[in-house]
Image (tube, rainbow, N blue to C red):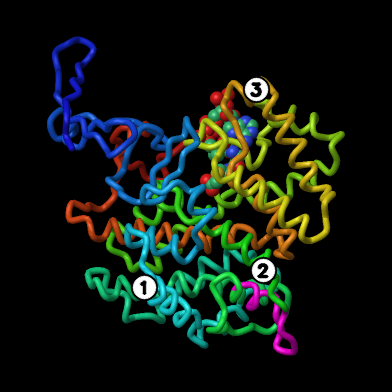
Amino acid sequence: MTKDVFILNSSDGSESIELPVESGAIGPDVIDISKLYEEKNVFTYDPGFVSTASCHSKITYIDGDEGILLYRGYPVEQLAKSSHFIEVAYLLLYGELPNKNLLNDFSSSITHHTMLNEGMLRFFNGFRYDAHPMAMLSAIVGSMSAYYHDTMDINSVHAREIFAHRIIAKLPTIAAAAYKHTVGQPFVYPRNDLGYCENLLHMFFSVPAENQEIDPVAVEALDLLFILHADHEQNCSTSTVRMAGSSGTNPYSAIAAGISALWGPAHGGANEAVLRMLEDIGSKKNIQKYIAKAKNKDDPFRLMGFGHRVYKNYDPRAKIIREMCHKVLNQKGRNNSPLLELAIELEEVALNDPYFIEKNLYPNVDFYSGIIYQALGIPTSMFTVMFAIGRTVGWVAHWREMIADPSGKISRPRQLYTGQPERDYMSLDNRA
Ligand code: CMC
């Protein structure tokens, strides 16, 4: 809704432009600068997009100052307490909570799309035994475009629907295949009698010779983590999916681009980095040393799992994960997990340190999640893959929203050129 105008004046007063101001359902107003270049021949400059809204979206809302996260209007705390991942996936994709029939149909469709083309399973043999699972994940998801040709037409609503169910269903299968490759075990096929998270644990930990008993607390913990990872509006990987998808590329390539963006330690790769950091710190007596490193501008070290572009308050997801951490460790009979105790002490010290207070640096979603994954027996290198499984739902929801938007354009930012002005080519003989 356009409600107002914003008047921008040049410093000498010779130029002025009225820019429309749009209000969303909640949150800050947005100044529409799309006509600025056409009318005034200037660009705006906003590295990292800290003040730039790139799209209209109805999917997720974050109030970073208050620590609020809503999926389609529902507080994430309520969904974490009362819903489950497949229902949340439906909500994010279709905008409303499903009734019983719709949920059964959706859940059954996901269950019946979990198998991976057999030819694709053989790809894993081409990777080194120590290949990072995120490298395998992005490669395999990208190569789905070479297998599932029936879903390449982005203008077909039906094809988009099949793609959405297929990618959400197959991510755990691909993740499990990547895991099995790293541990040198045979791939374990999905089972249609199991739920989404049960199936994932089955594919990870069963072997052809023996089915692994599935721990209900592990299922509950994974389901919760997937809910909390499912979407986070225009984060780096989701924006990457939208940007890649805006060129009209096939959806598997767009999701593979998102997976690559997620891998970085400033984004989803932080969960792996947190665990490695806690192991490096090793004991409570070293905490002050690492806090000092994090505060030292000349040291590239950052406290992993702390800080967020949007949250200037406690990340609501971190609070929920922290509670689940205790539940999982208690159930595993590990009331005294040294890693969890170290994390709690580190959090306490950081939250009382003036540097972290002034900069509003709080634990984020990645601070405690790795401790849960580790307690479930999932290796550190798989942590970001687990994040990707949950976030796939958000990527798909945003990709669908973008494709269906009739005002959509290819994403194409401009720049402030600071290189050489035009000059003439000089032959090799004449160069100094
Ligand atoms: N440790 C120490 N200092 C920090 C940290 C940290 N973890 N995070 C931010 N700062 C400082 C930073 O040095 C800067 O100081 P100054 O203003 O003096 O230059 C100030 O706080 C603002 O930081 P920024 O890098 O300008 O903020 P940003 O919004 O660009 O970055 C962030 C956000 C998440 C990349 C950053 O906080 C960070 O690198 N955190 C550690 C990595 C991490 O946990 N990432 C997971 C993010 S949440 C899940 C996800 O997105 O996947």
On the image, the x and y values in percent for residue 430 come to: 40, 40
Which circle marks residue 248 in the picture?
none
Q: CA distance from mark 2 to mark 3?
A: 41 Å
Of 386 and 418, which appears nearest the observer? 386
Query: Contact, CB < 8 Å: mark 1 with mark 2?
Result: no
- Is 206 magenta? The answer is yes
- From the viewer's perspective, is the residue at label 1 or at label 2 nearer? 2
Alpha-carbon neighbours of circle 2 within 10 Å: few (<14), some, or many (≥20)?
A: few
Q: Quadrant of residue 302?
A: top right
58 above or below 215?
Answer: above
Q: Secondary structure at mark 2?
A: helix
Residue appearing at x 23%, y 73% in the figure = 156
Toward the top, the furthest residue is 12
| Mark 3 CB lies closer than 8 A to ligand 1 | yes
Q: CA distance from mark 3 to mark 1?
A: 46 Å
Query: Contact, CB < 8 Å: mark 2 with mark 3?
Result: no
Q: Which residue is mark 1?
A: 163
Q: Which residue is mark 3?
A: 355
**Which quarter of the rendered image does ligand 1 occupy?**
top right
Residue appearing at x 70%, y 68% in the figure = 130
Alpha-carbon neighbours of circle 1 within 10 Å: few (<14), some, or many (≥20)?
A: many
Q: The magenta stretch spans which residues?
A: 200-212
270 above or below 85?
Answer: above
- From the viewer's perspective, is the residue at label 2 or at label 3 nearer? 2
Q: Secondary structure at mark 3?
A: helix
